[in-house]
Image (cartoon, rainbow, N blue to C red):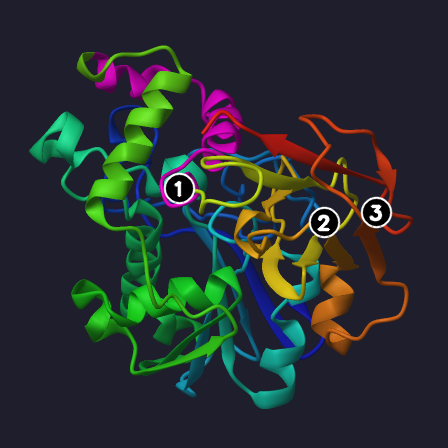
Amino acid sequence: MRQGDLVTFKGIPYAGPVSGANRFKAPPPLVSWTSVRDAFTPGPPSFQPSRPSFGAEEPFPSEDCLVLNIWTPAVDQRRRPVMFYNHGGGFVIGSGNTRYQDGSNLARLYDVVVVASNHRLGLLGYLFLADLAGEEYATSGNQGILDIAAALKWLHENIEAFGGDPHNVMVFGESGGGAKTSCIYALPTAKDYFNKASIERGPGVHMSPRDVATETAKMVLTELGLTQKEVLKLKEIPPEKLVEVQGAVAQKRPGGMQASPNWFGKGSRLWIDLGDVKNLAAVTVNGKKLGETWHPPYRVDATTALKPGANQITIEVVNAWVNRLIGDEQPGATKLTFADVKPYKANSPLLPSGLLGPVKVIRDDTH
């Protein structure tokens, strides 16, 4: 679709279907077509929590979401530099059709070809099953990254037809997209398809080890009421249910279950529950930045911020989007001080935060 001095192609498939028998596996090759295919509207994003709306005319999420968008100044033989974008969203939300990360201006102003892909997210993109389901699932655990590699391969083979140079490709991404870029940088099968990279916040320095990934898979089975012998039934679970389960498992997954002894008692944990936030929230407890909430339930583990013998907690909650624009010292930050947290039990009284709605302090003695 031509709009002024820019040509846009949307919803182009770059690999085969990954639903049904291909769930949790590497993406299969693209099945070619012979007729003319429209590229006027975006393809579906991956299944994800809360089904946010990312762009105009974006369809409902689908397992078969392996599509990409291209923004180019012209369909000619100029061989322009190519910028391949990995969207953010912490590996669980996001879309290559995000309206505030549209590639039009970048392509137009700098005479480059911009490409952004959709790829599998959450459990559909990163559930590791090789230790439970056997060699057939040896590539599981990194399905979403392999999707991105498949998109880069498609780009290498086809981008020249869209005015791009297949030998001058930069992969870049922000936040979760930066971590995905780190993974692509380290993936041997992707090395021939790009020659530079830019990690714009969120470097993927450490990923889950194999034993933690397998333990997470076991937790998924437990949440679904399945035994390890029934692991292949995961292919029959509706994707909406898997999204629901990943939210429950995220609060229990290995690495977040080992609480340091504190004055609550050995094994106790303290959660800061932000309720039904309308924006992402960045949380600081006792001066320690605990990160950002990305998907429901909007909750952070504050246990590591507690000091033995302490009886006061200061919590600061800010709007994460604003935080990224103007830094930590943003006006309107919500600061709460709990003078004596020790008496609070699970599901303590709601405490107003002003910026994001009710904040709840939750003591958890079940771990």
Q: What element carries label 1?
A: loop
User: Dot 2, how many residues are within 10 Å of its Cα: few (below 14), some (14-19), or many (20+)?
Assistant: few
Q: Residue shown at 38%/36% (left/top)?
A: 124
- Asked if residue 248 lies in the magenta stretch, the reply is yes
Residue type (three-letter) at the residue carrying disc 3: Leu
User: Circle 2 is placed at which residue position?
Assistant: 56
Between circles 2 and 3, the one closer to the viewer is 3
Res 102 visible: yes
Residue 298 occupies quadrant: top right
Residue 362, given in percent of the width and then of the height, sits at 67, 33
For marks 2 and 1 on the same chain, the one whose residue lies earlier in the sequence: 2
User: Dot 1, how many residues are within 10 Å of its Cα: few (below 14), some (14-19), or many (20+)?
Assistant: some
Residue type (three-letter) at the residue carrying disc 1: Gln
| Nearest the eye: 265 or 328 | 265
Q: Residue shown at 63%/49% (left/top)?
A: 293
Q: Give the range drawn in magenta.
A: 230-257
For marks 2 and 3 on the same chain, the one whose residue lies earlier in the sequence: 2
Whether label 2 touches label 1, CB < 8 Å:
no
User: Circle 1 is placed at which residue position?
Assistant: 258
Which quadrant does the C terminus fall into? top left
